[in-house]
Image (cartoon, rainbow, N blue to C red):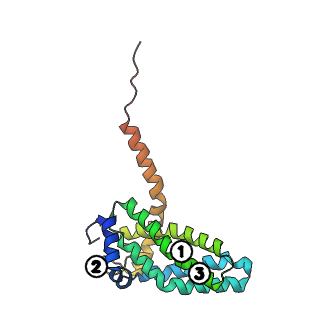
């Protein structure tokens, strides 16, 4: 990672001051390649009970909406990959992205008349929660990054994705294990007196 680490507030201020630079010029084509297809499938399957035509229409609307915007959301996530502390960066993108993306998504699908709107948006928000944290985790390790000297090829990223998924899944349990272990070492042991 070539850039120096910065605070979450510093990144947020920079994004607000220079939105064109961060969200358009740094548009993340890797995010735009994956996210729309997965989200279209989410909308297709959550609307299938309303009929295949409604499901297909919902999927197409999502595909058209997410095609260009997924790169913007990926760029926003990438902007926070250098931010410290990591938990604050994760929390920020977890709140900021869904707030922006799902507000627009809900309006687009409401205007289109997506039948299972609540279920679709809920499933999409759940996917966003997981995928945004994963993307931030991977981007902090140089995967799924676009533009710049530390960006790898898509082929290289695809080869690293399985290990990134395994590391991401293990990160939570490992953090809990380390915290518990640290508490166990830090606590003084009770002294047993001989009577």
Q: Would residue 173 be seen by someone viewing this image from the given angle?
A: yes
Q: Quadrant of residue 192?
A: top left
Q: CA distance from mark 2 to mark 1?
A: 32 Å
Q: What residue is rendered at 34% in x and 60% in y? A: 85
Q: Is residue 97 above or below residue 69?
A: above
Q: Position of residue 128 (x, y in %)?
A: 52, 70
Judged from the image, the secondary structure of the residue bearing numbered disc 1 is helix
Q: CA distance from mark 3 to mark 1?
A: 14 Å
Q: Quadrant of the C terminus?
A: top left
Crowd around label 2: few <14 · some 14–19 · many ≥20 (10 Å)? few
Q: Position of residue 17 (x, y in %)?
A: 31, 77
Q: Quadrant of the N terminus?
A: bottom left
Q: What residue is rendered at 53% in x and 79% in y? A: 104
Dot label at residue 149? 2
> Comparing marks 3 and 2, which lies closer to the viewer?
3
Q: Residue furthest top?
A: 195
Q: Would residue 144 be seen by someone viewing this image from the given angle?
A: no
Q: Position of residue 35 (x, y in %)?
A: 51, 78
N-terminal of the pair, mark 3 or mark 1, is 3
Judged from the image, the secondary structure of the residue bearing numbered disc 2 is loop
**Residue at which label 3 appears:** 40
**Residue at which label 1 appears:** 102
Q: Nearer the viewer, residue 133 or 167?
A: 133
Q: Nearer the viewer, residue 54 or 194?
A: 54
Q: Nearer the viewer, residue 32 or 156?
A: 32
């Amino acid at each position: 990672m070539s850039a120096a680490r910065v605070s979450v507030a510093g990144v947020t201020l920079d994004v607000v001051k220079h939105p064109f630079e961060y969200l358009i010029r740094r548009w993340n084509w890797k995010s735009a390649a994956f996210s729309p297809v997965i989200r279209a499938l989410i909308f297709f399957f959550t609307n299938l009970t309303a009929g295949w035509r409604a499901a297909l229409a919902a999927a197409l609307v999502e595909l058209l909406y997410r095609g260009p915007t997924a790169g913007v959301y990926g760029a926003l996530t990438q902007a926070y990959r250098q931010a410290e502390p990591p938990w604050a960066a994760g929390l920020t993108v977890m709140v900021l992205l869904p707030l922006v993306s799902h507000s627009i998504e809900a309006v687009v699908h409401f205007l289109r008349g997506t039948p299972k709107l609540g279920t679709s948006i809920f499933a999409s928000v759940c996917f966003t929660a997981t995928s945004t944290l994963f993307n931030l985790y991977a981007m902090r390790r140089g995967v799924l990054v676009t533009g710049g000297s530390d960006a790898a090829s898509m082929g290289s990223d695809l080869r690293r994705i399985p290990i990134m998924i395994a590391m991401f899944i293990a990160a939570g349990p490992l953090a809990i294990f380390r915290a518990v272990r640290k508490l166990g070492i830090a606590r003084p042991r009770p002294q047993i007196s001989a009577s």
